[in-house]
Structure formats: C-alpha cells, structure tokens
C-alpha cells in the first residue's frame, strides 16, 4: 500500500497521499484537503510548499548539492558549455555532436533582431536600467512574432520561439548597454560562438580592433552555466505562474526578468558591489557593517549572504570564487573590493549570528566581482544573470505546459472587516 499521512481535524482523521521524489524527497499531497475538510494550508513565501513535481534540477540545500538533469553542477561548470547546458535543460538530455551542431547553428542564425526594434532603444532614456529594457524588449518580441500567442501550439513553433529567445537575448542585452553609453550598436556575427558574439557586441568599438580574451570568455561561459537553472526560485515560479494563464512564452520570460531584478533575488549581484563600495567609502570597517546587518532595528542586510534553500555553502559560490581568483590573476587586477569581500566573508562566517542562521555567501556574492573585473558595468550584472537563467525559465515553462498544470491561483485566509453596510460619503 502506498504511504499516506494522517491528519486529525475537528476530531476526524483524514489520510493524505505521500509523494516521493527520485532523490527520496517527500511531500504530503494536500490537493484534496480543502474539498474534504474545508481547511487550506497557510505558507506565506511558500517556504514549505512544493508547487510542482519537476524533473529538471535537483537541489539539496542542507548538503549544498545542485544538479541539472542528474549532472553535478561542478562537472558541468568544468567540462561543458553554456549552450550544451541550455540544451540539457530544455530537452532533458545532453546533446549528441550532431544535435549540438544543429542547435548551435539555429541559435547562431537567429541572433539578429528586427531593425524596427532599434527605434525602441532610441526612445529609452539613457539612464534606463538595462533590466527594464531587457524585460520590455523580450515582451516586445511577441509583437514581432504574433504567431507565438498560443502557448499550446505545435512543437515546431515552440522550438522556434525558444531558439529566438536564446539567440536574441544576447543581442538585446548588449544593445541595451551600448545604448546606455550612447555608442553605436554592434551587430551579431555568425563567425563567433555564443559567448564571443556577446562579448563582441558588448565591447567592440568602431574605433579599434577588439580581441576576445579566452580567459574572460571562459569565465563568462562558466557563470552562465552556474546560473542556468535553480528549480522553483522566485523568477522561475513567476514564469510558471504567468505561463499557467497561457500567456505567451516571450511575455512569461519577460515577467521572469522582472522577478529576477529585485535585490533579494538576482539583483543582489549589483547590490553586493554597491554595498562593498559603500563600505570602502565609509572607511572599510567590515565589523561596523556586520554589526549593522545583525541589528534588527536596522534594515541593512549583508547582500550576497543567505539563501532560502541553501543552509550550507552555495555550491555555485564555491566554483565562482575560484573562477574569480583565476580571472583576477590572469588580468593582473588588484581590486580593493575583492579584498573587502574576502574579509567580509571571513568575519561573517566566524560570527555566531551568521552561524546560527546558516547564512553563507550565495552565488551573487562573487559573480559581481568577476563582472566588474571584465568590464561589465554594475547595472548590467543582473542582465548577465538573466541571460544565464533563460534556458532554466524556458525549461520550467515547457514542463508546466507539458504537464498540463492548472492555472496557478493560491488561496488566502481573509483577515479584513466582516460584512458591513455601505454609507454614502454625504452621510459620513
Ligand atoms: N543579512 C543579515 N541577516 C540575514 C540575511 C542577511 N543577508 N539573510 C537572512 N538574514 C537573517 C534574517 O533576518 C532572519 O533572522 P531572524 O531569524 O533573526 O529573523 C534569518 O536570517 C532568516 O532569514 P529570512 O529572511 O527569514 O530568510 P528567507 O529565506 O526569507 O530569505 C534571502 C532569503 C531573501 C535570500 C535573504 O537571506 C536575504 O535577503 N539575503 C540578502 C539578499 C541576497 O543576497 N539575495 C540573493 C539570494 S540568491 C539568488 O536569489 C540568486
């Protein structure tokens, strides 16, 4: 007999099915609870709620494990490429040589964006945050490809939308940067691979030859791999939730970008550098800022520390920390911000407050330092994260559609006034 959980409510016992995942994770299936008992479960922030059963990514926050499709993140970061990982997440298996060639060719051939989209760039204020531009432009793609409106359409057209998204996001991202500094945009070139193409569009100028540094290309590729998916996080859940209303894929991804932008999520990479810069300008006293982070009356938090699911070292942070050292050494960069970051990590990891709450540096703690070292401006950091996370969002959306999941619609416990009669303003 399959396992069940017993729940006693109002003197009556109910049996609820238990679901077990392939890594032994257990859940109580409460779908039928309200129908049977009238009770709902309450869990703001979804801290203990499984929104779906998913075969994409496995994460064990206590042990610090992260795997895409069963493959440990450490192996993928070391030996794979971002596009290969994108294929793995979206198709469920690593590609053969032939499959990869075909996938890569398709992506390479779709990097151009419609010339009319250039006009939108010109209309944005120079100070526009590139995350706002990215989200708007991704949503705008749906206006150029209106046939993408129907989320349940045939596999070929979904495939084309996926190809367009992965291909065009790097052009859209690089152009938002060029536009913000008032430089001419650089068109994609098919001779480059995915990362090189992005670097060329970001950094090459009409005034001088641009040479791609393979160490930087490597580090960027690694960063995108590490960000590619992270199961039911805030932005992935947003993509699934928006997509569950059958909104088209471009718009669902655009919503994911917005969710990622917040400083408690992907926006933390920008916030980390801004925080470290503030500490430096304030005289560099790490101890003072650690004390502020611990003070419950002070809203300040250590950006890049803590995670909803990792209660151990974020495995991605470990890999990034090493990549960060390699890049800085290769480029011969001495960065006072990095010294501060190292000191902050040291002080926080020894402090009882952080130990008791299992607060470790997360993926965003070190990624910003690499981006900074390779010349990516601070407000583009979260855009880099979005580029990396795109295949994960697509995979999550696709799984939700394929599983025919119902529209996402949580319930609530109402705590407002009970019924009362309306009185017109004149009588009040
Ligand atoms: N600095 C100081 N204290 C912290 C921090 C921090 N960065 N993070 C958590 N805490 C404290 C909380 O105040 C709380 O203390 P309490 O139990 O005494 O009330 C305790 O640790 C638990 O934290 P919660 O906020 O309940 O944890 P939650 O899972 O809701 O939040 C989050 C996780 C949002 C990541 C939080 O740790 C945070 O704000 N960190 C800083 C922002 C950040 O780096 N975000 C990036 C996350 S990684 C990513 O999204 C890619």
Image: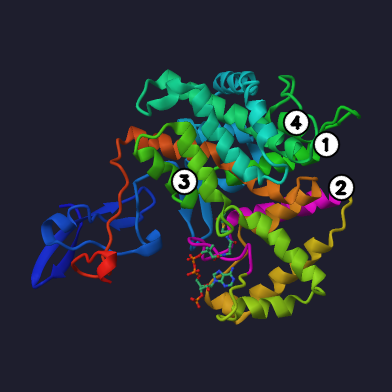
Label 3 within 8 A of ligand 1 by Cβ:
no
Q: Is residue 113 above or below residue 56?
A: above
Which residue is under mark 4? 201
Q: CA distance from mark 2 to mark 1?
A: 10 Å
Highlighted magenta segment, given as a residue range: 302-331
Q: Residue furthest right?
A: 208
Residue in the image at 62% along x and 75% along y: 293
Label 4 crowd bin: few (<14), some (14–19), many (20+), radius 10 Å: many
Q: CA distance from mark 4 to mark 1?
A: 14 Å
Q: Are marks 2 and 1 in contact (CB under 8 Å)?
A: yes
Which residue is under mark 3? 236
Q: Are marks 2 and 3 in contact (CB under 8 Å)?
A: no
The first of marks 3 and 4 along the sequence is 4
Query: Which mark lies nearer to you, 1 or 3?
Result: 3
Residue in the image at 27% along x and 52% along y: 19
Residue 230 shown left or right of residue 263 in the figure:
left
SS for callout 4: helix
In which quadrant will I find the C terminus?
bottom left
């Amino acid at each position: 007999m399959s396992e069940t959980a017993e729940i006693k409510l109002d003197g009556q016992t109910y049996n609820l099915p238990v679901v077990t995942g392939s890594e032994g994770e257990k859940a109580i299936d409460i779908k039928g609870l309200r129908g049977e008992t009238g009770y709902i479960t309450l869990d703001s922030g979804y801290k203990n709620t499984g929104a779906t059963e998913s075969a994409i990514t496995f994460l064990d926050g206590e042990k610090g494990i992260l795997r895409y499709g069963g493959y440990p993140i450490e192996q993928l970061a070391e030996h794979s490429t971002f596009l290969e990982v994108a294929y793995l997440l979206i198709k469920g298996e690593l590609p053969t040589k032939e499959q990869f060639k075909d996938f890569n060719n398709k992506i390479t051939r779709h990097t151009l964006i419609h010339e009319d989209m250039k006009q939108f760039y010109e209309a944005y204020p120079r100070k526009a945050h590139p995350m706002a531009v990215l989200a708007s432009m991704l949503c705008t793609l749906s206006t150029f490809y209106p046939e993408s409106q129907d989320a349940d359409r045939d596999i070929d057209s979904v495939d084309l939308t996926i190809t367009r998204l992965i291909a065009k996001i790097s052009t859209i991202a690089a152009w938002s940067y060029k536009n913000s500094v008032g430089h001419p945009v650089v068109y994609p070139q098919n001779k480059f691979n995915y990362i090189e193409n992005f670097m060329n569009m970001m950094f090459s100028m009409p005034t001088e030859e641009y040479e791609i540094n393979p160490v930087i290309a490597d580090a960027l590729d690694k960063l995108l791999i590490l960000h590619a998916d992270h199961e039911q996080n805030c932005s992935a859940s947003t993509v699934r939730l928006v997509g569950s209303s059958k909104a088209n894929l471009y718009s669902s991804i655009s919503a994911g970008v917005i969710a990622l932008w917040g400083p408690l999520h992907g926006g933390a990479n920008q916030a980390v550098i801004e925080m470290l810069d503030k500490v430096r300008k304030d005289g560099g006293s790490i101890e003072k800022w650690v004390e502020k982070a611990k003070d419950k009356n002070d809203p300040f938090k250590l950006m890049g520390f803590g995670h909803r699911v990792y209660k151990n070292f974020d495995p991605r942070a470990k890999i990034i920390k090493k990549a960060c050292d390699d890049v800085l050494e290769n480029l011969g960069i001495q960065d006072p911000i990095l010294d501060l970051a190292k000191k902050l990590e040291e002080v926080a990891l020894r402090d009882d407050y952080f130990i008791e709450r299992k607060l470790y540096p997360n993926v965003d703690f070190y990624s910003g330092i690499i981006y900074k070292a390779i010349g990516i401006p601070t407000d583009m950091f979260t855009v880099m994260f979005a580029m990396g996370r795109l295949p994960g969002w697509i995979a999550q959306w696709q799984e939700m559609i394929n599983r025919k999941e119902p529209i996402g619609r949580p319930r609530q416990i109402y705590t407002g006034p009970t019924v009362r009669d309306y009185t017109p303003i004149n009588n009040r």
